[in-house]
Image (tube, rainbow, N blue to C red):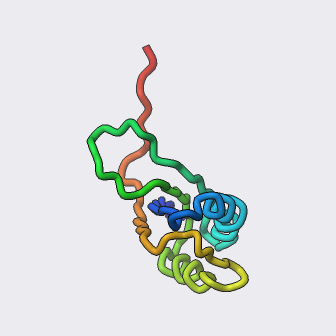
């Protein structure tokens, strides 16, 4: 079955950082992982040391592993749950967010240990 990676960049609504963290970890990640095809998810926070100077508009990134024969159907299932009892959204999630989906074109390479 084909595997994909979905990367989402988000920010909390100003002044609602604690609510955002609680909702995202306790509610949203588990809700997304109930959608058929979503296999794993992990959240990341931007660190101050970056390869290039800013601006860096996104404070958080979430990475989901997806395994499905029909990516469109998987995304349709996800979208159908947004703002329903199956996937309540929080006002602490800023409207400014973006997501991208990818498929691997090479195997994962690891550094040789010396």
Residue visible at 68% across and 70% down? 31
Counting from the top left corner in percent of width and height, residue 95 is at 46, 75
Residue visible at 59% across and 86% down? 80
Residue visible at 40% across and 65% down? 100
Does residue 73 sit above or below 106 in this rendering?
A: below
Does residue 41 sit above or below 109 in this rendering?
A: below
Q: Quadrant of the N terminus?
A: bottom right
Counting from the top left corner in percent of width and height, residue 67 is at 56, 64
Q: Where, by quadrant of the figure, is residue 29 drawn? A: bottom right
Q: Where, by quadrant of the figure, is residue 37 drawn? A: bottom right
Q: Nearer the viewer, residue 87 or 92?
A: 92
Q: Residue furthest front?
A: 15
Counting from the top left corner in percent of width and height, residue 70 is at 51, 76
Q: Nearer the viewer, residue 82 or 2?
A: 82
Residue visible at 65% across and 73% down? 35
Q: Is residue 99 left or right of residue 32?
A: left
Q: Quadrant of the C terminus?
A: top left
Q: Is residue 15 left or right of residue 18?
A: left
Does residue 10 sit above or below 84 in this rendering?
A: above
User: So how many labels did they put on this image?
Assistant: 0
Q: Residue furthest left?
A: 53
Q: Nearer the viewer, residue 107 or 94?
A: 94
Q: Nearer the viewer, residue 65 or 57?
A: 57
Q: Residue furthest top?
A: 114
Counting from the top left corner in percent of width and height, residue 103 is at 41, 60
Q: Is residue 111 left or right of residue 37?
A: left
């Amino acid at each position: 079955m084909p595997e994909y990676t979905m990367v989402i960049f988000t920010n909390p609504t100003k002044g609602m950082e604690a609510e955002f963290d609680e909702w995202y970890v306790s509610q949203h990640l588990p809700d997304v992982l109930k959608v058929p095809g979503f296999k794993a998810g992990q959240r990341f926070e931007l660190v101050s040391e970056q390869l290039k100077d800013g601006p860096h508009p996104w404070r958080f990134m979430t990475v989901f592993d997806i395994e499905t024969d029909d990516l469109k159907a998987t995304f349709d299932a996800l979208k159908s749950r947004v703002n329903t009892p199956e996937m309540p959204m929080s006002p602490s999630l800023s409207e400014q967010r973006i997501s991208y989906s990818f498929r691997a074109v090479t195997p994962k390479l690891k550094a040789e240990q010396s």
